Amino acid sequence: MEKGPGPAPAEKAQGARCSNGFPEARGAPATGGWRSERPRSLEDEALSLPALAAAYASILRSLGEDPQRQGLLKTPWRAATAMQFFTKGYQETIAGHTVKTECPSSPYSHTAKCLAILGLPSWASRSAGLFLDVLNDAIFDEDHDEMVIVKDIDMYSMCEHHLVPFVGKVHIGYLPNKQVLGLSKLARHMCMVMRGVQKMNSKTVTSTMLGVFREDPKTREEFLTLIKS
């Protein structure tokens, strides 16, 4: 019996190419978007930035602009960096691990530029290039079982239909189970909502109840009453 054809040889990875005046780079996987279990990594950010900038340059040309004119020379890169920042919630995690950057420790101008491209704050370089998760181990043992609420948290997200920003307010409540979370971390965690997956409307109210808030009507009513007070 004849054997069928073997597997096709793997293609050799290609280096960066130039397209429309901007280098193309192997971006992060497009299939499945950023909704897989792994958060968007710093490596994904660095790889996708040149292609993202090239896309913005193409948009400018489609609008009849010249990306090479003086006022627009750096606009594609600025726009690409801004888009990565607006969607940086995909890069953050509450899993409790750290990510090491490849940014140089000196000179400062190189460090600052590298961190800006990755969407990291300047203080990240002071921790040997480590960027901690959003909770930063701010979970404390506490014999406390009363409802904890943080309300009127400013939320910034992006409409998935037109990629335009919108703002809102978020109220968070939970019942501690022998552990409490630093209050500022609840608001910090809201940075992860800016993922461009919200629907656009003139005014939208959404509600998600989990755990005891979903199962116990009295607990749910108490929470809703408290956030209105």
Image (cartoon, grey):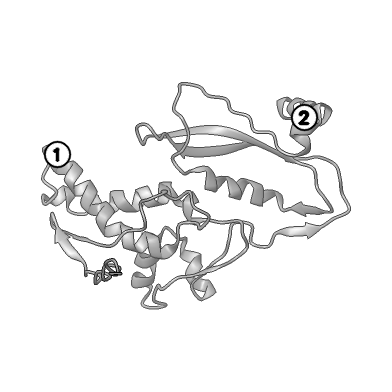
Answer whether residue 207 is visible to the viewer in this image: yes
Q: Position of residue 213 (x, y in %)?
A: 76, 34
Who comes first in sequence, dot 1 or dot 2? Answer: 1
Residue 223: quarter of image:
top right
Q: Position of residue 1 (x, y in %)?
A: 30, 69
The residue where tag 2 is placed is 220
Q: Residue 87 vs residue 207: left or right? A: left
Specify few, some or many for label 1: CA neighbours under 10 Å numbering under 14, 14-19, or 20 or more: few
Which label number is shown at residue 62? 1
Element type at marker 1? helix
Residue at (17% x, 53% y) in the render: 73
Residue 28: quarter of image:
bottom left
Q: Residue 201 vs residue 59: left or right? A: right
Q: Distance of mark 1 from mark 2, alpha carbons? A: 51 Å
Label 2 amino acid?
Arg
Specify few, some or many for label 2: CA neighbours under 10 Å numbering under 14, 14-19, or 20 or more: some
When the figure is inspected, residue 200 is found, relative to residue 174, above or below; the finding is above
Residue at (43% x, 47% y) in the render: 87
Q: Where is residue 12 in the image (x, y as percent from the top left)?
A: 24, 72
Q: Residue furthest top?
A: 202
Which image quarter is the C terminus in? top right
When the figure is inspected, residue 189 is found, relative to residue 103, above or below; the finding is above
Residue at (56% x, 38% y) in the render: 154
Q: Which residue lies furthest to the right in this view?
A: 143
Label 1 amino acid?
Ser
Residue 221: quarter of image:
top right
